[in-house]
Amino acid sequence: MLIELLQQRRSTRQFKTDKITSEQLEQLTEALLRAPTSRGRNPWHFVVVDDPQLLSQLSKAKAHGAEFLAKAPLAVAICADSAVSDVWVEDCAIAAIILQLTAESLGLGSCWAQMRLRSDANGHSAEANVREILNLPMGWNVDCIIGIGQPVQRLAGHPRASLPDGKIHRNRLPK
Ligand SMILES: Cc1cc2nc3c(=O)[nH]c(=O)nc-3n(C[C@H](O)[C@H](O)[C@H](O)COP(=O)(O)O)c2cc1C
């Protein structure tokens, strides 16, 4: 049941050194390609990275919050040709969460590293840094990079009572 997966899901930023198997990679990439997109335009491109040197470079593409990529056995850069769809951001975000939930369903952990609208310690665009590190064409935007691997430690899911029930509204909001 998906709800059980969601009840247990947490972001994972520390990974064991175990490699992702080819069977796991096949399932992760199939899940990505099954992500729905607006008008079926599939503006995205997914760059699967397991080269430790590239992972180290990607971990420094922005100033904070991408350090965990350096020791992830696998990272997937979620990119898109923004000329193909005006809603590429939404399409990328959907693909990213599908990737994360598929990883979770395979017993793996993952974490999102935001790249779009972020910059490095010198104020350079994180997206431009990723484009350079991975040799991406100029027209491609980079939404985020998802780091994936075996979790060192499994954090407990958020307790039901801690969820912000006040965010759910019925019919109209009161005036
Ligand atoms: C759009 C988005 C951007 C995020 N960016 C980062 C990031 O750059 N670095 C990071 O370590 N975590 C990032 N996260 C993970 C969140 O910090 C995490 O999901 C949130 O704190 C809740 O924790 P949980 O996933 O363990 O429930 C991002 C999550 C989302 C959805």
Image (cartoon, helix red, strand yellow):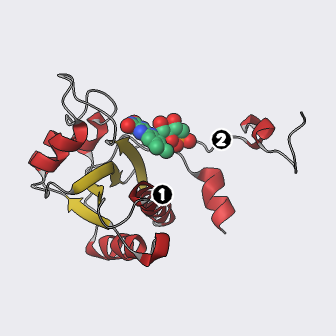
**In the image, farthest residue toward the top:** 122
SS at badge 2: loop
Question: Tag 1: residue type?
Answer: Ile
Decide if residue 154 is in sight here: no
Q: How many marks?
A: 2
Q: Position of residue 32 (x, y in %)?
A: 39, 70
- In the image, residue 107 lies at what x, y percent? 46, 61
Q: Which mark is residue 158?
A: 2
Quadrant for residue 80, please give it.
Answer: bottom left
As drawn, the label of residue 97 is: 1
Residue in the image at 27% along x and 52% along y: 141
Q: Is residue 94 left or right of residue 83?
A: right
- Rendering quarter of residue 160: top right
Distance from mark 2 CB to nearest ligand 1 atom below 8 Å: yes
Q: Amino acid at mark 2?
A: His
In this picture, residue 67 sits left or right of residue 171? left
Q: Residues within 10 Å of mark 2 (few under 14, many from 20)?
A: few
CB of mark 1 near ligand 1 (< 8 Å): yes
Does residue 167 lie above or below 131 as drawn? above
Q: CA distance from mark 1 to mark 2?
A: 18 Å
Is 5 placed above or below 170 here? below
In front here: 165 or 174? Answer: 174
The percent position of residue 128, horizontal first and vertical second, equals: 18, 42
Q: Residues within 10 Å of mark 1 (few under 14, many from 20)?
A: some
User: Mark 2 or mark 1, which is nearer the start of the sequence?
Assistant: 1
Q: Residue at x 25, y 50 (%)?
A: 17
Q: Position of residue 126 (x, y in %)?
A: 23, 37
SS category of the residue bearing label 1:
helix
Q: Residue at 41% x, 46% y: name it.
A: 111
Residue closer to the observer: 137 or 121: 137
User: Is residue 149 toward the left or the right of residue 7 in the image?
Assistant: left
